[in-house]
Every structure is written in structure tokens, then in C-alpha cells.
Image (cartoon, rainbow, N blue to C red):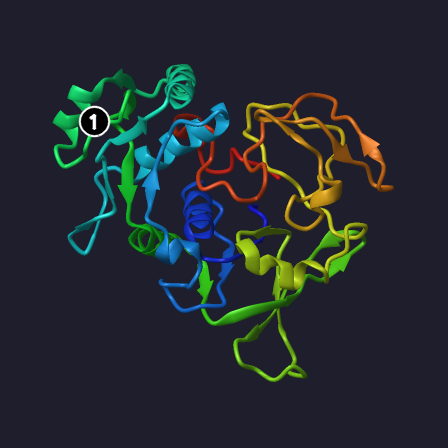
Amino acid sequence: MAPHVAIIGLGVVGSALADELVLRGWNDVTVVEQGPLYVTGGSSSHAPGFVFQTSPSRSMSLLAQRTLDKLDGLELRGEWLMKRTGGLEIASTQERAHELKRRRAFADAAGIPSQLIGPEEISALWPELDTSGLTSALHTPTDAVVKGVRAVEFQASRAQVYGARILPHAKVVGIPTRESRVIGLDVLPVGAPQDAEPERIPADIVVSAAGLWGRAWRASCSASSCRCSLWSTGSDSAPSCRSWRTWMIAPRRAGRCSGTRITRCTSGNGGSASPSAPMSTALCRWSTAVWPARRSSAAPGSIRP
């Protein structure tokens, strides 16, 4: 039986996570959002939405590719969610041109189509740009613009169809624990009196996708009492240490991420312990928009806490 999952925040991260979970058969998902649907007021509502796939982190590059592949061709009420406009990073100094060479190497390592081009090719792609002071540019033709609000609504709506519960205008006021494990969320309607009795939403796993708003309730869950499990793909060996610090709740004591591997976890007494085998990370900071596991190997139930 899939665990109860509670997600705080319905931005691009929260909606994508809810969508990915229900597509894998984890239907007992509740998303709590303090704003309205679907223009929630955070960065997902007003960010320009351009997605550069190239990153020094191979994991982040692969996640960006997965995100664009997932949204490619989808529509919401006849309007596109994503358009592959291509990306153009320009250089006007030799130092910047050298940096673009490094970025092309990052792109090549991640399998992202890219090309270093000169001023004439830049003009062909962007005729309105004055290229007289430019030396080169990095062209990435598969980069895209994503309409954030549309992407949120599409994924959240699909998650609801598969059983997810979404609560708008609901504010998290506490994360209750029992025996050093989270057991749910305490929420109040936005605008409710401070002395009102909060609703308890049971949960085995709590995921923060609240961004800056997470600071308000994070203090209610101390680093010594709140622990939860990271999720790994079914092909990995389970570590002997099952309690992993969350990055959002206990950031200063969390295990460090090294590539796509967690190198430390916490033992039951709060000390440090090494896992018996490396575990590929599905969520490194609880803020990953899509899962790094291949869809072909992610059958319902193949992701475990």
C-alpha cells in the first residue's frame, strides 16, 4: 500500500511532484496551498519561464531535459504549455567566450544539442540584435519557454483526476511528530483566527515545496525531532539507515548531495551513519520538479520510501 504523502505548496514543484506520484500509483496525495488556484502568488506565477537545460550539474541538466520532454506537445484549453524557442547566450568579452566554451562542454556531457556560433549566425537567429560588440554565442536549439501557470494547472488537474486532493487557501501551522517521525500536517484556512483548531492531515511523508514561505512553519519542526525518508528508484539497494534528514526542515544538519548520491544519513540517535549501499536520489532538496528515474522502469509501486 502506498504511503500517505502531504505536499506543501502548489507551484511548479508541488504540482509536478503530485502528478508524478499519482502516475506511479501513489494516489493518497494531499497538496496544501495557501494561495488561490492556480495563480498562487509565488515565483511560479510570475517567472519568465525560460528553461536553459545546460548546467554544471549533470543531474540538473537531466532534470531540465525530463521536464521539457514531459511538457512537450501538451495543451491546456487549446493553449500550449511549452514552446521550444531555442536559447542564445551571448559573449562580448574573451572571458565570457571562454565561459561559453565550458558551458558547451557541459551541454555535450548531458547530451544537449548546442553549437558555438559567430556574429553573422547570431544575426541570422536574432536580426534585431546589434552584434557589433559580440564575439560569439552558445546556441541551444532545444531550450524552451514554459508557461508556469498553465504547467501548474495541467499537472495539478491530472493529479486530481488520479485521486490527489488539493486544498487551496490553506496554511500550514504545524508539522506534528511521533517518535521522531512526521505524522501529518496541521492546517488552518487562510484568515482563520489564531486560536482556531487546525485540521490534522495524516501523512507518512511530508514534502516541502513552499519556497521562501517554508520558513514560517519550519521552526515548528525541530532538527532533532523531524526526519523523513528520501525516495529511491526500485533498482537501488535500500540503505541500512532509513531516516534521512530533509533539506527543508533541517538544512544545516542535512546530508550533503554529491552528484546524484546521498553521502550521509542520520541514525536513530541523531548521529551520522553511512548507508550500506549508495542510494540514487529521487529528491535531493525536496524541490525537484521531475523524477530522474526513467519512465520505462517506473511502474506503479516501484518507488519506495
131 relative to 110, above or below: below
Relative to 277, 45 lies left or right: left
Relative vertical location of residue 225 with respect to residue 295 in this rendering, above or below? below
Neighbor class of circle 1 (other Cα within 10 Å; few <14, some 14-19, many 20+) is: few
- Whether residue 296 is visible: yes
Looking at the rendered structure, the secondary structure element under dot 1 is loop
Which residue lies at the image location 29% right of the left edge and 54% below the top edge?
150
Q: Which quarter of the rendering shows the C terminus? A: top right
* Residue underneath mark 1: 132
- For the point 69% across and 21% down, the residue is 277
The image position of residue 35, as x and y in percent, is 45, 68
**In which quadrant of the rendered view does residue 137 lie?**
top left
Position above or below: 242 against 185: above
- Observer-nearest residue: 25 or 248? 248
Q: Give the quadrant of residue 69.
A: top left
- Give percent across and percent down for residue 302: 51, 33
Residue at image position (37%, 65%) is: 37
Residue 274 at x, y percent in the picture: 77, 26
Q: Inspect the image, locate mark 1, and give the three-letter code of the amino acid beneath it.
A: Ser
Is 239 placed left or right of 127 in the picture? right
Q: Is residue 100 left or right of residue 33?
A: left
Farthest residue to the front: give it.
133
Instruction: Determine if residue 184 is in view.
Output: no
Q: Position of residue 248 (x, y in %)?
A: 64, 48
| Of the pair 217 and 242, the residue shown nearer to us | 217
The count of marks equals: 1
